[in-house]
Amino acid sequence: MPELTFLDTKRRATHRLVDAIREKCLGTTFRDLARQTGVSANTVKSIAKDLITELEETVRYETPVIMGIDEVMLAGDYRCVITNLATNNIFEILEYRTQDHLKPFFKDLADREKVEWVCTDMWRPFKRSFAEYLPNAKLVIDKYHVIQMATKALEEERKKYQSELTRQQRIHVKKSIRWITLKRPHNLSDPEKKALEALRENVPQLTVAYDFKEMFCKIYDEPDKQMAQNAFEAWENSLPDKGFDDFKKLAKTIHNHYEDIFAYWDSPFPITNAYTEAMNGLIKMSNRLGRGYSYEMIRAKTLYS
């Protein structure tokens, strides 16, 4: 047979078609790309695997100065997502979030002394995993995870109130009162502000919980660490002796992670894990669109698309 230089050596396709599939395969589903090109989904998958092998050997991301760590449920298990919060990109996705997987990763991390800040939630294995191997890194617990605990404490108070109502009343409360109490005051519309004032008259216990939630959130509005610590102390001292157990649990959690939570004010600018959380949402969406993807394929699509 004559040598046809425009044909791919591994497949019954032209180099041009294979290149077009390589360019798009990590950013769209295999099935959609198969429809567009007229080849089978398995052919697209095979081309993608070859591309991923090349990328694994050639692509290296710069070690983050500010690192975000979080977990995401993918392909039936919790995976560890690591981001660069200074450049807003995914740095790595590890197969598991256990210390057995995390410690070797941090031990072998290139330029690990470059990492100055690590932002994560209060799950202790994260800190235990990197503390030994990142000598210059300081942990900052993500403020949104902390504030979320105050919101959950308020939600528990609402549920206690709802439990005393009829089914129809519970539905009405959940539809109306819940969204008002979850909002910050500056985000309330004029009708919602009036509804909140009416709530103060009719359900004072619930609005007291709302005020505790707001008072706690305002801690993060303080400009420096000492003022934030004073604000937390004032908030904790304002809690009554009886009731509001979930807010008291929140206070205990703050004391258990005190240094790491208030390290938020030590950083040169506010560091949060918002980007990592947003990327987790996109990863989950990609996983849903391409049902049946393995962890390895989801990781590659996330890192290289």
Image (cartoon, rainbow, N blue to C red):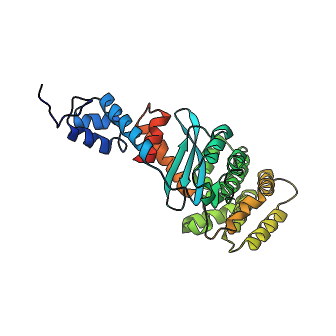
> Is 124 rendered above or below residue 234?
above
| Residue that sits furthest to the left in the current view | 2
Quarter the N terminus occupies = top left
Q: How many marks?
A: 0
Spot occupied by residue 166 in the image (x, y as percentages of width and height): 67, 42
> Is 108 rendered above or below residue 150?
above
Spot occupied by residue 27 in the image (x, y as percentages of width and height): 36, 45
User: From the viewer's perspective, is 155 left or right of 40?
Assistant: right
The quadrant where residue 171 appears: top right
Q: Is residue 134 visible?
A: yes
User: From the viewer's perspective, is 108 left or right of 299?
Assistant: right
Spot occupied by residue 232 in the image (x, y as percentages of width and height): 77, 66
Choose between 159 and 140: the one closer to the eye: 140
Spot occupied by residue 15 in the image (x, y as percentages of width and height): 22, 38
The quadrant where residue 57 appears: top left
> Is 290 rendered above or below residue 189?
above
Choose between 295 and 188: the one closer to the eye: 295
The quadrant where residue 28 appears: top left
Q: Is residue 204 visible?
A: no
Query: Which residue is painted at 61% across and 44% down in the image?
Result: 105
Query: Which residue is painted at 73% across and 44% down in the image?
Result: 164
Query: Which residue is painted at 20% across and 36% down in the image?
Result: 14
